[in-house]
Structures are given as C-alpha cells and as structure tokens.
Amino acid sequence: MSIPLMVEIKLTEMVKPSKFIPPQTLSFSTLDNDPFNEVIYKVCYVFKAKNVVDDASDWPESLLKEALSDLLVYYYPLSGSLKRRESDRKFQLSCGGDEGGVAFTVATTNVELFSLNYLDNIDSDTALKFLPKLLQVEGGYRPFAIQVTKFECGGFILGTATSHAMSDGYGAGHTMCALTELAGGKKKLTMTPVWERERLVGEPVDDQPPLAPGGATAVSPYLPTDDWVTERINIRPESIRRLKEATLEECDFSSEAQALTTFEVTSAYLWKSRVKALKLDKDGVTVLGFATGIRNVVDPPLSDGYYGNAYIGMNVSLTVREVDEFGISDIVKLIKETKKKAHSKTHLQKELANIENIIKMNLRIRGKKDGLYLLTDVRNIGIFGPMDFGWNEPVNIVPVVPPETARTINMVMRPSRLDQAMVGGVQIMTTLPRDAMVKFKEEISALD
C-alpha cells in the first residue's frame, strides 16, 4: 500500500540582494508586454540525493538561499514588483531600495523521490505541491519565487515560478544556471545579464488592423468537454530517426540552409495525429503555432546575456483535409518557410507593430480553439551550462502550465536522464479530451 504524499511548508522568507540596489523603475519590450505572454510558468528541477547525507549541512537550502541573494545583485529585476498600468496596459517594474525580494520557501515530504519516479509522468496537481506561488502586492505581484522541497531519501526538488513578462525559456535557463553557479562557489557568472528591453519596442500602426492569434475554424465532436486528460508521451530516438529518414525519402532537404530538425518532423507528425484524434471536420481550418527565436534578427544581435522574451509566434494554417492528405515532408516545407519568414527584419517590425496594436485594443483570442495547436519547445530550459552544485545534474526537468493553457499549448521536452534508452528522444506533454487521447496515443505508438 502506497503512502499518501504530504508536503509541509516549513518556512517562507523574503531574500533580498546581497548588495544595495538603487531604487528604479524599469519598462519592458513589446514582446514582454504581449498579453498572450501574460502567464506564470513553473518548472520543477529534480535532484537525486548525494551518495551520503551526513547532517543538515548536506541539505541544499542554505546554499541556494545565499546564492539567490547573490544572484539578485545581477538579476535584481527579479526582486521587484510587477504591475500592468491601466493607462496603456504596459508592464512596469519597481525594484531596488529597501523594498522587494524573492519569496524563498522550504518544504518537506513524507516519501522518497523514487516513489514518485522522479516526477516522470507526474500529474500537474501533484507537481504543483513542489512549486511556489508568486506573492501578490498592491496593484501587482512579485515576478519570481523559489521552493526547495526536501525528500526523506536526501533528494530534493527545486521549484520555480516566473512571470513570462520577465523572460522566455532561454532566459529562464540562463537564470537557473547562474543560480547554481553561485551555489557551487563561483564568484563571477559565466554570462552577465543585460536588460536592454528597449531594443525590442515597436510602434503601433493606425492603418494596420491587428491580427490576434487564432484563425482556427475546425470543430471537434469531443468539444466542449470537462473530461480532459494530460499525458507525457515518449518518442524514442529510433522512431525519430526513422521518421526523418522517411521524410528525406519524400523530399531532399539538403539544399536548405538548415538541416531537417527533430522539432520539424515531430511537430508535423504530432499535428497530423492530433487532427485525427480530435476528428476535426474536414473543411475546417486548423492552425499549427510555434515559437521562433529572433535573437539574431535584431541588428546588432541581442547579447547572450539578454534574458527577456526574444521569440515571436508563427502559424501554419491548413484545412483539416490538407493536413490529412499532405505528407510529413509537405508540412515540414511549410514549417521551414514560416521559420524563414520570422528571420526577416521587416517581418519582425511588422510583428512588433501588430502586438502594440493588440495591446492598445486589448484583444484576446476569441472563438473556438478546437483546431488551434500550439507547440513550444522547452528542451533548452536549464541546459546552458552545468547545474551541478554538489548534487549532480538534475535527473528531470518538468515544466508545469495552468490547465487552461495546457489545452492548446503542448510541450516538446527532454526526457528524464534516468532512462538511457531515451537519450536523443523527446517527451511530449499533451492535453486532450479523454476519448481523443486514446486515438492520439495509438498514432504515436505507430512510430515504434
């Protein structure tokens, strides 16, 4: 009989920068201000126990708390207060001075990490027990928080909550690697962070009607429903290799500037699989949306230390009939063409103007979302450098998104480090109506 999981909060305290930061008010880029980015994303970094735990000094919280205080000297905006102004719906950050800080929580559990399979395929409700909540302040909230949850085996979970306005996955990865560098004893960061949000500010264009994300008209007989399920599904490296080989037999991509990527072939296959699983109507429109980095589109390119949002959303729209009839290579061609478009300076300026218009008019996604399929690749979170500060690298990195968000945004993740057979493979986190999930998993199994 398994023991019911209990997580007990031992303390929560505010950690301030270890050096005085002058009070200041910071503004954000257009991409940071995008209302469709106004979500809180949370991540669990799972660390196995040391070989030997002798006493309390072998627990990580004192190291991490001190490192966090030093980190906030570099990343001082994380200790500020974030609010969206009513006047123009733009974010404003107040930081520095005697106010502010980051909530640092320590919790304990009554089980061992392996009993939870190191959070592999854990449900979101359980994962949330290991994740902090952002503190509310007058008119806004603190944009960053940390929770360390200790297990009886000596392992722990480092949970983070971050406002998407502060950074994208790339920026969050750099921040966490910086934290563990300092916890490991480094006196200077490998990467010096920069704010520079003014470099990605657009101007609204009065004669340019704003285009809100969406445009999908296809409907599913399974929707609406309250019976949703979330699964983390592994796609083995051998399956990806065969999928790439089959795609290259259909079309030679050797003349392309970039080779055929894992994301391109898997997203094409996943889109086709999801369309079948939901039984979308043939003449309706379905949309595949994905993020494309624009760090090198800016002239000069953004600094490596830039940790703000530096991507734009790109869409491929087809009728359901076309998605069914097209081969993987046909869809990959469309994805590649769309990615090329995103790398145009002209397109970036138009997108920044479009987002400014969306903010100005306070637009939201309207209409049905049955055929809207957004994929985000989070395989790079936390792998920009070593995160070993005495407990080796995290054996698992588990992003957690709100249930409403998960219904349209699916994640492409790195599998757990514990399964050597999955090295080079990917894990997909997807949310579907229960009946549709059965068909979706059948489609994925067909890759094996």
Image (spheres, rainbow, N blue to C red):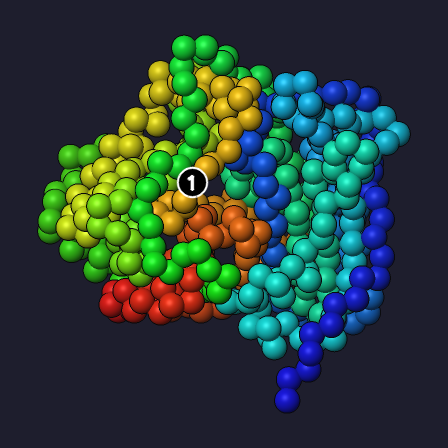
Name the outermost residue toward the top. Answer: 206
Which is more toward the observer, 251 or 222? 222
Q: Position of residue 152 (x, y in %)?
A: 73, 74
Q: Where is residue 219 shown, x and y percent of the image?
A: 33, 50
> Where does the image place residue 237, in percent across and percent down from the top left?
31, 61
153 over 68 or under it: above or below? below
| Residue 103, x across and y down, in percent | 78, 46
Residue that appears at 51% across and 33% down: 364
Crowd band around label 1 with a 10 angstrom C-alpha radius: few (<14), some (14–19), many (20+): few
Residue 142 quadrant? top right
The answer to whether residue 255 is seen in the rendering is yes
Q: In this view, does 198 lie to the left or right of 389?
A: left
Above or below, 16 relative to 53: above
Residue at point 66%, 20% (across, down):
27
Q: What residue type is labelled 1?
A: Gly
Q: Is residue 262 visible?
A: no
Asked which quadrant contains residue 277, the reply is bottom left
Which image quarter: residue 421? bottom left
Residue nearest the observer in this picture, 53 or 295: 295
The residue under the point 68% across, 82% down is 3
Q: In this view, does 119 lie to the left or right of 18?
A: left
Quadrant location of the C terminus in the rendered image = bottom left
